[in-house]
Each structure stands twice: as C-alpha cells, then as structure tokens.
Image: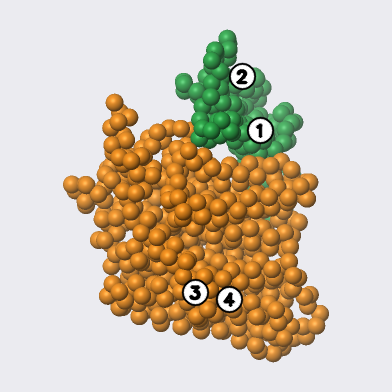
Chain colours: A orange, B green
Amino acid sequence: MNNHLFLPLIVPLMGAALAVLLGRRRTLARAVVLAVVLFSTGYGGWLLWLVSVAGRQATQASNWPAPFGISLVADLLGATMLFVSSLLMLGAVAYSLATIEADYEQHFYYPLLLLLLLGVSGAFLTGDLFNLYVWFEVLLMSSFGLLTLGGTRGQLVGGLKYVVLNLVGSTVFLIGGGMIYGLAGTLNMAHLGERLATLREPGLATAIAGLFLFAFGSKAAIAPLFFWLPESYHTPPPAVTAIFSGLMTKVGVYALYRVFGLVLANELARMAPLILALAGATMVLGVLGALAQTEMRRVLSFTIIAEVGYCVMGLGLASAAGLAAGLLFTAHVMIVKAGLLFLAGAIERSAGTGDLRKLGGMARREPVLATFWFLGMLSLAGVPPMSGFFGKLALLQAGVAQGQYVITGVAATVSLLIFLALLKIWNEVFWKKSYEDQSKLPRVSVAALAPGALLVVLSLVIGVAAGPISELSALAGAQALDLTGYAQATCGAGGCEAAMSELMK
Amino acid sequence: MYDSVILRSVARLMLPILLMLAVFMLLRGHNLPGGGFIGGLVASCAVILQMVAFGPTFARRALPANYLAIAAFGVLFAGVWGLPSLIGGQPFLTSLWLPQPIPGVGKIGTPVLFDVGVFLTVVGVTTQIALLLAEEPLLFPTERGPADGEGAPRA
C-alpha cells in the first residue's frame, strides 16, 4: 500500500492546528511551521522521484474500495506540481520569517499558510472530482484570509472582487460536478473517464466541459475572467503575493489539465480551438495590461495573466507533447515568478514604495539583488541558459509541429512584449538615477534576499539540466492523457468498471 | 438585541437541555441521524441562544471558553484518531472498533472519537463567529454605547 500519500495532507493540517494552539509561544509555533514545510518539500521531492521510477502511486482513503471511496493518486503531473508548490511554500515561510510583522503573526498568518498548503496538496493528489472541489474550497478559504489579513481599504476592495468571482467559479464547478454525477453516476475521475469515453449522447458532456472550463478558467485567470487578479494581488504583503502567484492560478491550470486530459478527453479534442483562442487572448490582454502599469507588483500581476495564457496553450494543443510543454512551462513560471516577486517585495520593503516613478538607482545600491533580478528577468523572458527558454521552446515546437501557427506566432510575440514590460521595471527601478536621497533607506537583509535568489538559481539549474527534466515532462504529458494507466493504478488491473461490477457481486 | 421575558426564560431553560441533546446526537451519530457536525451545531445553538437573549457579554460568561482553541484542538483530535490505522498499515481514517459495545454509550471506535473532534471544531468555529459578529460595535451600537462610526444603524 502507498499510505504515505496521506502524509502531505495530515502533516500541514496537524501543523496548522498546533500552530493555532501554540499561539503566543511564537518561537515554538514558528518551529512547527518551518518543520511542516521542510517535511512537505522533502516529501514532495521524494514522491516525484518515486513516481518517476516506480510509476503512479495510489491509495484509498478509509480503505473504501476504489470507484466508491475517495482515491488519492500521484502521477508525474500531480507529483511535480506538489513538489514545486511545497518548495515555493518553503520559500514563502522563510521570507515571512524574515519580513512579516508581529501583528500578522498574531492573526494566524502561518496557520493560514499551512492550510493553503493543505488545500493545494490535496488538489494535486486527489483522484475524485468532488474531493477536488473540497480541496479547492480549503485553499480558497485560507487564501481569502491571507488576502484580507491586515484589513486595509485596498485589500478589502481587492479581496471582495476575489471572493465574489471565486465563489461564482466554485458554484459553477459544483453545478458541473452535480451534472456529471447525474450523467455518469460516479465521481472517481478514472471511472468518469471510462464512462464518458463511451457515452451515446455526448451533447451533455460538451455542456459540462463548458462549465468546467468556466469554473477552472476563472480560478486560473484566463481571458475574460481575469480581472480579479490584478485588483487583488498587489495589496497583501509581498510574501502572500508571491505564494499566490505561484499556487492559486496554477491550481486552476492543473485542474484544467487533469479534468480535460483525463475525464473529458473527447471534449478536449472538440474544444481545443476555443481553448487556444482563449489562451491567445489571455496572453495578449495580460501583457498589454502589464505594459500600462506603473507599479512593480501590478506589472508582475499582469504578466502572471499572460503566462497563464502559455500554460493554457499547452492544454489547447490537445496532445501529449502540448501538455508536457505546458507542464514544463508551468513549473518554470511558478518558480521564477515567485522568485521575482520575493525580490520585488524586498525592494518595496526597503524603499517603502513599489511605484516605478519614485524608485531608482537600485542597481548601484543593491548590486546583488539587481544581479538576481536580472537573471530572473532573463529567465521569465526566455533567454537561453535559463529555464524559461526551454519551457517556451517546447511550447513553440509543439505548436509548430501541430500546425498551429497563429497561436505560436502570438506566443512568440507576446514573449517579447513580456520582456519589454520587465525591462520597464529594470530601467525604472534599477537603472535610472534616483531623484531622492537614498542613503537613509535601510539595506535589504540577506534573509529577505535569499528566498528569491535561490529560486532564480533553481531556474538556472533547471535550464542547465533541461535534458532530463524535459524527458520527465514528456513522460508526465503522456501520463496525463493515459486514462487506462490511470484507471489501472486507481482501481486495479481491470480498470474501474470491472472493479465496480466485481464489488457489486 | 431585544428584551423579551419569554425569550429570556426559555433561553435559561434550554441551555442544559440543548447541551445534553448535543452529546446525545454526537454519540448516536455513527449509524443513525446525528453525528459530530449536527451535535456541534446544536451545542453552539445553546450558546448563541444565550447571546440572542442576554447579549454576547453574558454568553461569554455563561460558558467561559476559548472557542478558537477548542476548534484547533478539535481538528488536532479528529486527525489523531485517523493515525492508529495508518500506523497499523491501513489507509488513513480506516475504522477500528472495540469488539463489544459499551452499555449506555454504544459501539466505540475511532470514528466516534473522530466525531468528537468534529464536534469540538464545529462548536468552536460557529460560536466564535457568532460571538464576534455580535460583538462588532458597528452592527449593534447599543451593546457598547453609541458607535463613533458614521452611518451605523440605530437600534
């Protein structure tokens, strides 16, 4: 049995409860939180290694047999996302330990972070559609808390839009889940995939696919549904912005990959042109927004949207190569974008503002930080030795190979525009001379610099080790579309339908 | 808040009854309607009724407890009772039962103890939310004297 799959759920939950109970004993509570994220990161790495050598891992919660109970399944797609997100959470906790105010800590900042990690881990591991909804709710609840903690006017205004749109998305997800249960009579994703593949009347499945596209698309911030993101992401402390940029939209992307790759594979083929069009629109609108902004974290928030367009483009190509490229790009952008936001947060903290017009002279004042920012910027833009190059290259190659020239052209052009938006930050914040006297500003501490710098270094490492990593992602892309293998791992050798009729006897 | 003699008398009477009903619901819940969640809601109703009848200050005094800590402890407690099966090589939360039912209480196993954790969490969370809302000075300005904010509703 693979009962270790429960650990990334049990440990953050218990850790969060313990951290609330410890409350005032701050050192002890911090130690618990740090131990939990260290464990999760280590476990995520180990699980990724295990899945890459031994194939998919599955277990059944409460020992209820497969198509009836809740299955936990780790395949390469899920395990990669789990590892990267626990790594980012480790970075966020380390950064928060260095920067977050005591007031936040008293209002359960760290327990909320752990609950966010719990929700994300659950979403990446579950093999059950309704359970996926539950994990979405867990992570949304904690994100509502994190976003509005502090209670400033901007946070509440942004938080309100965030909450409303996400609740609408969740409701549509729930409606879609109810309809798919009525249609297929099961919620286990492997079983659903088997039953929907042989459906006589596929019209209803198309309607359900549209609902899921809306629900997950609103969480992933794709084209017409992204307006909540730039309204809310720049308001909380930088650590929260960074972890949100890494996790929240990417959980939506993961859910799109999982549900469309596995459950609604027929619909994916049918809806691919629509998904590609949405991806293109997301890229263009996101990057145009980024070019128009004049505040560091707002520019970066809009580029998040543009990059979600690339992640969704991987899905819209509707092939194993497309999904593999999309996953490679998603993992890269999670790491680099969080790293850049940590660095931007360090600057903002030191200078007291994120306004591009007021900042300046940072290249002279903080040369180490400027170096890492520059490297991260190159990576995000897709300049060769860094991870961004290989992510984008894989996407463009897959696009050309499938004859999707329009979206490939859009992706290549938007890539240049993203570079332009980031260059604007570079020019204004680092390169131009400061108008004001900066000698009194506090220096950026090593502890605030380290998480962002290490993530940028990790991007460089991914770029150098691109060979094995792209092989792994190719395998993950093939696995994400392989329903038979997934069903065998979840329900046993005969697949879920056979397992169910066996159990009914 | 309104002041009603009937409500006050009933609320006083209902506090012990509701709390006992909550425990009853909790213990029968595994195979019959009830359980930790419903039991927890009934128990928190007991406190919320005091709050409606006498105000949040009295409700805090009637059952003095740190509801947030109760909720956190409940989560921890519920989770812990999934662990014995995990240690024994079974999936998390697999039910383990005592072989004989205990007279007057019924069958006891890890699901019942898990339910106790759920009970504590629900009591803690719902009561804390209700009390915090009622203690919000802008919403109920009479409770703590006139509110200084503008546009506050006058009761």
Q: Nearer the viewer, mark 2 or mark 1?
A: 2
Are the residues under badges 3 and 1 in a single subunit?
no
Q: Are marks 4 and 1 in contact (CB under 8 Å)?
A: no
Q: Chain of mark 4?
A: A
Q: Quadrant of residue A154?
A: bottom right
Who is closer to the viewer here, A351 or A110?
Answer: A110
Residue kind at label 2, given as amino acid type: Met
Are the residues under badges 3 and 2 in a single subunit?
no
Q: Are marks 3 and 2 in contact (CB under 8 Å)?
A: no
Q: Are marks 4 and 2 in contact (CB under 8 Å)?
A: no
What residue is disc 4 on?
A: A376
Residue kind at label 3, given as amino acid type: Gly
Q: Is residue A356 above or below residue B63?
A: below
Q: Residues within 10 Å of mark 2 (few under 14, many from 20)?
A: some
Q: Nearer the viewer, mark 3 or mark 1?
A: 3
Which of the two labelled residues, at mark 3 and mark 4, occupies the earlier sequence position? 4
Q: CA distance from mark 4 to mark 2?
A: 61 Å
Residue A89 position within the rendered picture, expressed as x and y whole percent measured from the top left: 61, 58
Residue A208 position within the rendered picture, expressed as x and y whole percent measured from the top left: 30, 51
Residue B56 position within the rendered picture, expressed as x and y whole percent measured from the top left: 69, 36
**Residue drawn at (35%, 44%) of the image:** A488
What residue is disc 1 on?
A: B51
Residue A299 position within the rendered picture, expressed as x and y whole percent measured from the top left: 55, 75
Q: Nearer the viewer, mark 4 or mark 1?
A: 4
Q: CA distance from mark 4 to mark 1?
A: 55 Å
What residue is disc 3 on?
A: A388
Confirm whether residue B78 shows in the render: no
Q: CA distance from mark 3 to mark 4?
A: 9 Å
What residue is disc 2 on?
A: B20
